[in-house]
Amino acid sequence: MRLFALLTMLLMPLSLFAGESGFEDIERDTKWSGEIAVTKPLHVLKDANLQITPGTKVTFDIPSSEEFEPTPWILVEGSIEIGGTASAPVIFKVANKTVQKSTQDMFNLLAAKSAKISYGHFIGAGWALHIHDTPTLIENSRFMEGYGGIRSSSDNLEVSGSVFSANKIGMRLLNAEGVTISSCDFSENLTGIFLRQGIRDISIAKNYFANAEYDIKLGELQEEDVNASSNWWMTSPALGGVKIFDGKDSAGVGLVKTDPELDLSKKTERRDEKTFEKP
């Protein structure tokens, strides 16, 4: 059943996106720097690499789509390297202030060769990153003021040192194993992390949670327990906090195990807030 679902996710987007959707192909290795305006959907082909250098500012100026599943703004089947630094992050933002649809992807990594993202700041996306079956490393990045930060069905995803703030959902995971989420801040989202179903062997540690409705939410079909020990919680589960949704709230759902919790009074800031650019 899982294989059928994965094949459906992989094959359907190819047929929808690759032919008549108006992509402009990136066919060879390409390097971006300076100010980049994206005015139509782009497709990084399988033999191409898109490298984005420190300090680059990418602005998406693409009209909103009325389709239920809009074309992603950048579809990656080759490889992508977003190489910002602490003093010169790579900024991705939307030209207009319109709230993007919950199905609009800024980047769709579709069985791509690889993705490495360092100090990327994603502002105002529908979903900043949509990841399928792609080896992906994300570090020291920010996902702000969009519908969602990362949605993924990719095994062994690694996310560290990153901020998810003011989104409807920080991260949403489906049918994946070996995911690592560490040293991240999830704050002021409606939901911090949503584990929809089929999540196995996940590590969630040394993160800070302070969200409006749920810090971690398990979907009705997520049967396996989730280890979320050694995190900081603004609303402590051990003290009766109600920002976890799991098997205590719905029969048949796994449990989120949060013990031991880290001492919030000893939490220190890890990132320089001055490196974040507001839209």
Image (cartoon, helix red, strand yellow):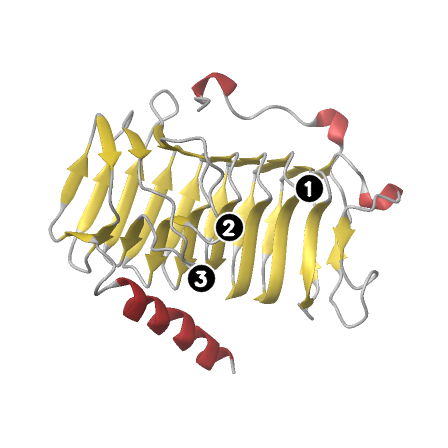
- Tag 3: amino acid: Ser
Of the 4 image quadrants, the one containing the C terminus is: top left
- Dividing the picture into quadrants, the one containing residue 32 is top left
The x, y position of residue 262, in whole percent, is 73, 37
User: Does label 3 or label 2 sit earlier along the sequence?
Assistant: 2
Mark 2 element type:
loop
Left or right placement of residue 78 versus residue 257 in this view:
left
Question: Which element carries disc 3, helix, strand or loop?
Answer: loop
Q: How far apart in space, not on screen, are marks 1 and 3 (Cα)?
A: 23 Å
Q: Are marks 1 and 3 in contact (CB under 8 Å)?
A: no
Q: Is residue 142 toward the left or the right of residue 262 in the image?
A: left
Give residue 211's quadrant in the image.
top right
Q: Residue at x 25, y 52 (%)?
A: 79
Residue assigned mark 1: 231
Q: Earlier in the sequence, mark 1 or mark 3?
A: 3
Residue depicted at 23% across the width and 31% down the height: 36
Q: Position of residue 133 (x, y in %)?
A: 39, 64
The span from disc 2 to disc 1 (Cα, nearest Å) is: 28 Å
How many other residues sit within 10 Å of disc 3, few (<14), some (14-19) or many (≥20)? many
Which sits earlier in the primary sequence, circle 2 or circle 1? 2
Three-letter code for the amino acid on which mark 2 is drawn: Ser
What numbered label is drawn on residue 154? 3
Q: Quadrant of residue 253?
A: bottom right
* Closer mark to the observer between disc 1 and disc 3: 3
The local secondary structure at tag 1 comes to: loop
Instruction: Give neighbour class at mark 2: few <14, some 14-19, many 20+ (Cα, 10 Å).
Output: some
Q: Is residue 55 above or below residue 158?
A: above
Spatial CA span between label 3 and label 2 = 20 Å
Q: Nearer the viewer, residue 242 or 202?
A: 242
Residue beneath label 2, please? 102
Foreground residue, 135 or 29? 29
